[in-house]
């Protein structure tokens, strides 16, 4: 099943200098090949230094000076603010990391099924992370999808309040959404998609899922060669 005509996803992947050769280059080569005949765009979200070094080689955007583990928080939130302020055109916004593998064929099926729904944040992976406030949050390693309406709703709130967790970027996003929901009648809902495979399951038929949190289990080239 193909996505609705002209439905465009903006894929954003957090990357870092330490894994540039091991992950970022493989991710870039894979997404470039997979999206060349599609309306989708993809960006690699890194540091200002990385953008200066690699902007002629790949679509990389620098949104922070830091490049440590915690910088993923600023990369995730600032990338949303960046595209919101630039009024980037898309129908769906995807957040991933440098080790998030997307099977676009199965991803298209998800998009076709979600196309009529609005005001919903679509999340893959486990929803079992509990913060001190007792609320269920999310893990975003396999990726997070939201439609344009949700993106345009939550991003100005993030820009104004910029709530961060002390460790995780995906939980930081969830904290902003919970805070938004606390003061708005119509909440953004969290939904877990089984087609998104969490990082705790190493054995996977890549042809049966939409995304996979690779970590260092399998290289992108091996996974892409397994696609049918």
Image (cartoon, grey):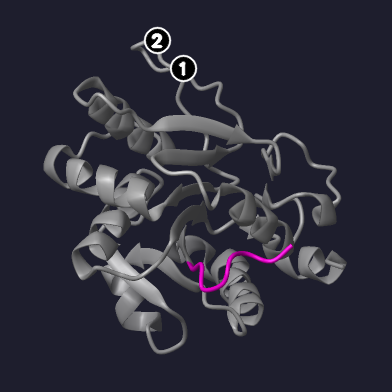
> In the image, what residue occupies the spot 40% across and 66% down?
90
Residue 14 percent coordinates (x, y): 44, 58
Image side of residue 26 versus residue 129, left or right: right
The tag on residue 82 is none
The tag on residue 130 is 1
Q: Residue 133: say if magenta.
A: no
| Quadrant (top left, top right, bottom left, bottom right) of the C terminus | bottom right
Q: Quarter-wise, where is residue 227 in the image?
A: bottom right
For label 2, the SS is loop
Q: Residue 7: say if magenta.
A: yes
Q: Residue furthest front?
A: 116
Q: Residue furthest bottom?
A: 56
Range of the magenta residues? 1-8
The tag on residue 134 is 2
For label 1, the SS is loop
Residue 82 percent coordinates (x, y): 24, 63
Mark 2 nearby-residue class (10 Å; few <14, some 14–19, many ≥20): few
| Tag 2 and tag 1, C-beta contact below 8 Å | yes
Residue 136 percent coordinates (x, y): 46, 19
């Amino acid at each position: 099943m193909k996505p609705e005509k002209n439905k465009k996803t903006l894929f954003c992947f957090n990357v870092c200098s330490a894994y540039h050769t091991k992950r970022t280059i493989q991710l870039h080569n894979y997404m470039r090949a997979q999206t060349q005949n599609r309306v989708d765009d993809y960006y690699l979200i890194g540091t200002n230094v990385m953008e200066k070094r690699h902007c002629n080689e790949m679509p990389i955007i620098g949104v922070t000076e830091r490049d440590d583990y915690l910088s993923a928080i600023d990369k995730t939130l600032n990338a949303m603010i960046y595209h919101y302020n630039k009024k980037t055109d898309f129908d769906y916004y995807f957040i991933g990391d440098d080790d998030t593998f997307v099977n676009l064929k199965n991803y298209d099926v998800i998009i076709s099924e979600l196309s009529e729904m609005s005001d919903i944040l679509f999340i893959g992976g486990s929803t079992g992370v509990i913060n001190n406030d007792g609320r269920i949050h999310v893990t975003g390693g396999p990726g997070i999808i939201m439609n344009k309406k949700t993106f345009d709703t939550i991003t100005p709130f993030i820009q104004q309040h910029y709530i961060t967790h002390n460790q995780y970027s995906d939980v930081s996003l969830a904290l902003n959404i919970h805070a938004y929901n606390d003061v708005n009648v119509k909440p953004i809902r969290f939904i877990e998609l089984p087609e998104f495979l969490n990082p705790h399951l190493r054995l996977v038929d890549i042809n049966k899922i939409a995304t996979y949190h690779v970590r260092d289990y399998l290289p992108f080239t091996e996974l892409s060669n397994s696609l049918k």
